[in-house]
Image (cartoon, helix red, strand yellow):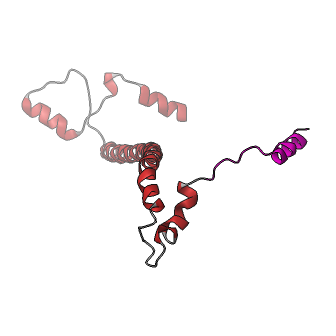
């Protein structure tokens, strides 16, 4: 049954073509003579063709919206990745550029940001000391070397 219906739709002979009655009437009024013996479409066929036209427009619109949505999601993901790359680059650049001025402010004992006496040691230096002034690497002591040798064995 399905194969028969598909074969009917695939048949492109000009003898099977039908047009609506109003088109046939317009052709005869304008003097256009059809070389094919075509008849008018039945009302059911006209209704089906109109319904299929509307359905195809709705279907194409839905497919277009779905495609736009997937493209928008992909572009948003790409944009988020690129923003993250630039954020990391900016952070590392700012950390290098801001370290010296902030360190000089925190090391100056005459400046007071904490509200009380005592200079920068009481305020910002406590907060940012570990960040701006990392601990110096301790020298290799004999005890550390012995522990390292024990772990190595």
For the view shown, which residue lies furthest in the front direction?
110
- Determine whether, in the image, residue 141 is placed left or right of residue 22: right
| Location of residue 126 (image quadrant) | bottom right
Instruction: Classify the position of the C terminus by image quarter.
Output: top right
Tally of numbered discs: 0
Instruction: Classify the position of the N terminus by image quarter.
Output: top right
Q: Position of residue 4 (x, y in %)?
A: 51, 31
Q: Taking the image as drawn, is residue 10 in sight?
A: yes
Q: Position of residue 65 (x, y in %)?
A: 38, 47
Residue at point 24%, 39% (across, down)? 20
Residue 139 is one of the magenta-drawn residues: yes
Residue at point 46%, 65% (across, down)? 109
- Determine whether, in the image, residue 28 is placed left or right of residue 94: left
Q: Nearer the viewer, residue 9 or 52?
A: 52
| Location of residue 24 (image quadrant) | top left
Q: Nearer the viewer, residue 109 or 126?
A: 109
Q: Position of residue 104 (x, y in %)?
A: 44, 56
Residue 118 is one of the magenta-drawn residues: no
Q: Taking the image as drawn, is residue 1 in sight?
A: no
For the view shown, which residue lies furthest in the left direction?
30
Q: Nearer the viewer, residue 117 or 70?
A: 117
- Determine whether, in the image, residue 9 is placed left or right of residue 44: right
Q: Position of residue 108 (x, y in %)?
A: 44, 62
Is residue 146 shown above or below 6? below
Residue at point 41%, 67% (across, down)? 111
Residue at point 56%, 54% (across, down)? 133
Q: Which residues are magenta?
A: 135-153
Is residue 68 shown above or below 108? above
């Amino acid at each position: 049954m399905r194969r028969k219906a598909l074969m009917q739709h695939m048949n492109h002979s000009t003898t099977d073509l039908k047009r609506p009655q109003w088109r046939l009437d317009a052709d005869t009024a304008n003097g256009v003579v059809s070389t094919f013996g075509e008849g008018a479409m039945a009302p059911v066929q006209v209704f089906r063709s109109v319904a299929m036209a509307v359905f195809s427009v709705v279907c194409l619109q839905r497919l277009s919206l779905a495609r736009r949505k997937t493209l928008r999601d992909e572009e948003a993901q790409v944009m988020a990745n690129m923003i993250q790359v630039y954020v990391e680059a900016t952070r590392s650049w700012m950390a290098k550029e801001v370290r010296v001025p902030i360190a000089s402010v925190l090391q100056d004992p005459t400046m007071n940001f904490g509200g009380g006496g005592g200079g920068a040691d009481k305020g910002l230096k406590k907060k940012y000391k570990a960040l701006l002034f990392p601990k110096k690497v301790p020298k290799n002591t004999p005890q550390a070397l012995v522990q390292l040798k024990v772990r190595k064995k």
